[in-house]
Amino acid sequence: MRIRSVLFAPGNRGEVLLKLPRSSPDVAVLDLEDAVPAAQKAEAREISHQAATELRAAAPQMGLCVRVNALVSEHFVDDLASLPPGLDAVIVPKLESADHVDAVLSAFSSNGIDTGLFAGLETAAGVEHAVEILSQPGVSAAYFGAEDFVADMGGVRTAGNDEVAYARSRVVLAGRLGGVPVADQVVADFGDEARFVREAAEARAMGYAGKLCIHPAQVGLANTAFVPGPEEIERARALVAAYDEALARGEAAIAFDGQMVDEPVAQQARSLLARAEA
């Protein structure tokens, strides 16, 4: 499942859920957690179940997930029991340990859920134990939730992201070690296109596979940001060709376009080309 753009919508808003395919996100998320007031959780389950069935028929190419409430929530058990068939993953927020993952997967099994776990890392404990969480079998994707993380830390959220720099890096590193693609934090100010583009570029440079979106206008920005552009692709092809020629001559380091190129740099270019082909 590709996760360049992961678009959330409130699970209690059926008319909004059915519009999710319009912006062509890689993954549409029917949210039963933060976007739904406590008094409307039961209603949201029913609405999301019906919407998921219609969305799967209308947009089979789109990834489809439901975000349930956290494992420790009073709503978790009922959320799992209400899930529709045909989901690509179930998103479980605020995971904090390998034991949490085991408990979630056990609950999946008890409810006949055989899809992947999309893990939310958005607390201090979740970030601290990110490597063990994302190394567990059954975890198919993950995201870093900056807003909840900063709230848990008792910090202050800023546009500069200094307060989440360590956590953001730790989570994507854990994803690499666990072989799990990770989506980057939301930009809550959905009218700030420049900030979204900047953060998406940072995230891609760090190794993130995509970005969480809370508004359809962010989807296209994310889809573009996480795909190499034509100039990048052309330069990478030229660099790899020049380096391969050098290797054939017995040279392991060359100058290319004013840059020293050795095997790690060439491998970066090969990886970029592989992503472009994918």
Image: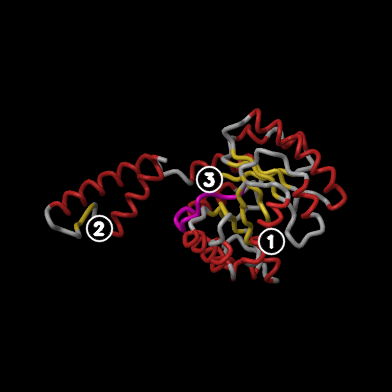
- For residue 3, the mark is none
Q: Give the alpha-carbon distance from disc 2 to disc 3, as whole Å.
A: 29 Å
Q: Which residue is mark 2?
A: 261
* Dot 2: element: strand
Task: From this view, report whether residue 168 is shown above or below residue 29.
Answer: below
* Dot 3: element: loop
Please tell me which residue lies in front, 75 or 128. 75
Q: Confirm whether the magenta stretch covers residue 205.
A: yes
Q: Which residue is mark 3?
A: 4
Q: Quadrant of the C terminus?
A: top left
Task: From this view, report whether residue 50 is shown above or below residue 40.
Answer: above
Asked if disc 3 and disc 1 are in contact, CB closer than 8 Å, the reply is no
Q: State the extent of the magenta-drawn residues as a range.
A: 204-213
Task: From this view, report whether residue 266 is shown above or below residue 217.
Answer: below
Q: Residue 121, image x and y in percent? A: 62, 61
Type of the residue with mark 3: Arg
**Whether residue 232 is visible:** no
Q: Which residue is mark 1?
A: 103
Type of the residue with mark 2: Val
Task: Tell me the residue at 61%/35% (across/down).
Answer: 23
